[in-house]
Image: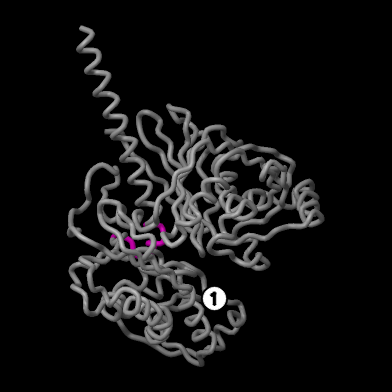
Amino acid sequence: MAKRKEELKPLHTNNAPKAGDLMRAHDGVIRVILDLGNSVIKVTIVTDTGQEFVWFTISYPHALRTLTEAQFEEEQMRAKYAMVSGNKLTDVFQYSRKVDGEMQVRSFEVGENAERTMDSRRTGGPKYRWDYYPALFLKALLELLPDGYDNIHVLALFPSSDFRHIETIMKTIGGKHAVELANGKKVVYNVRKVSVDDEPNGGLNNYLLADDGVHYRTVNIPEGRGLCVDVGGKISSMTPFNRMGWVGRNDAQPKDIGIQDSMGVFGDLILAKKKFEYLTGHGKDTAVIDTDLFEAHRGRGLPQDEAMRKAFLTGVYETNGYPLVVKNEIEIAKRTVLNGLRDLYTQEFSGGGGFNYIVVTGGGGGLLFHELVSQVFSNFNVHRVYMSHPDDPMNMYLANIMGARKKLIGSLAWASSTQIIQEIKEQKDAN
């Protein structure tokens, strides 16, 4: 069995592996998994070197700003005089491709730097059009494969409720993508094959499969019909499915609510608070301070993502060197999403009736798991509610793409083993 190696960088990573590490494909194919979340975009590149599988996962905000010709020329001028460097160069680019036989050109800024002035975030069918979906995806390729590549296979994950747009997904991701950076560098990515899979399968596979994608980490999933509950940043969904890969696409129900709604409430509560209780570092002793110490933070929007996620899991928010006790604020903030999910669960899925198990996935699912079990699925057998990434709930926003990566690597490993066995058999027959 081939060895596996994973390099996982944090959200908004600024450190990419050397392109050579990902370009040692013994079959000439670089495989890319795309999870275009409505809050965070996740992309994993997988290479089979013949000796091991090398993969790298990058994530960045779902934020895109369409630039005018003058705005792109301004970025070109900044690049010319070395006013931008590093990651910023992969955030801004001009994208060209043929659409219905005609060459189309658009300029974009993608990722963290586009968040403040981004275009309206698209959902449903408009999200998968050529002037949006590929542009968000290309940022990852520009960072991880900066010189382009001619033989890319893409596995695109999608919410089951978007199954009507599969043909559009395959059409807009496939083919040649020509990119010019602000510094004048031109690269081409040729996507020769596109396949798709439902996000619930990714969450389930991450729970079931070991890291090699071949062995099972657990068999603790019963037979029968399951319900996948995916709590994302902006949108959540509930989808019937089972462990054999069947997904009830027609019954999938999205809801325009996610963990960022709760984070917004929490941010407002923190900014309006008059006094804070904080841990002193001596056991569980606490002290109280006035919010004047935090005046500099007022009006700056939400706290940092990592600190926020930790606060939702621990009830302690760390800022300015103070571990603030915020359990009450977190409890209030969580209700925003929990109430919406309870309504969806009760009204559309009969409060769990007819389901043998539930798998919870998505970044919000990791932060709300215990409340989901006790407050939303309160009538369900607690031993049959599973977390798709139980080892690291704070980073469960990566669960779907990790599950897809495990499944992909497992498939490649089995194919390689089958080929070796066939070659041995043919050699024996020849002798």
29 vs 231: above or below: above
Circle 1: element type:
loop
Task: Report the colour scheme.
Answer: one colour
226 vs 115, nearest the viewer: 226
Which residue is depicted at the point 47% across and 69% down? 235
Residue 215 lies within the magenta run: no
Which residue is depicted at the point 40% across and 33% down? 48
Residue 278 in picture, x, y percent from top left: 41, 84
Residue 71 in picture, x, y percent from top left: 78, 57
For label 1, count other residues whose C-alpha is less than 10 Å away and answer few (under 14), some (14-19) or many (20+): some
Quadrant of the frame with the N terminus? top left
Residue 428 in picture, x, y percent from top left: 20, 12
User: Is residue 50 in view?
Assistant: yes
Which quadrant of the view contains residue 112? bottom right
| 118 horizontally vs 428: left or right | right
| 202 horizontally vs 117: left or right | left
> Please, which residue is most extreme toward the bottom here?
274
Span shown in magenta? 391-399
Question: What's the amino acid at mark 1?
Answer: Leu
Main secondary-structure element of the magenta-colored stretch: helix
Which residue is labeled 1 in the image?
Answer: 302
Which residue is depicted at the point 20% across and 58% down? 221
Which residue is depicted at the point 20% across and 66% down? 356
236 vs 278, nearest the viewer: 236
232 vs 92, nearest the viewer: 232
> Please, which residue is most extreme toward the top here?
431
Residue 26 in picture, x, y percent from top left: 43, 27
User: Is residue 325 in view?
Assistant: no
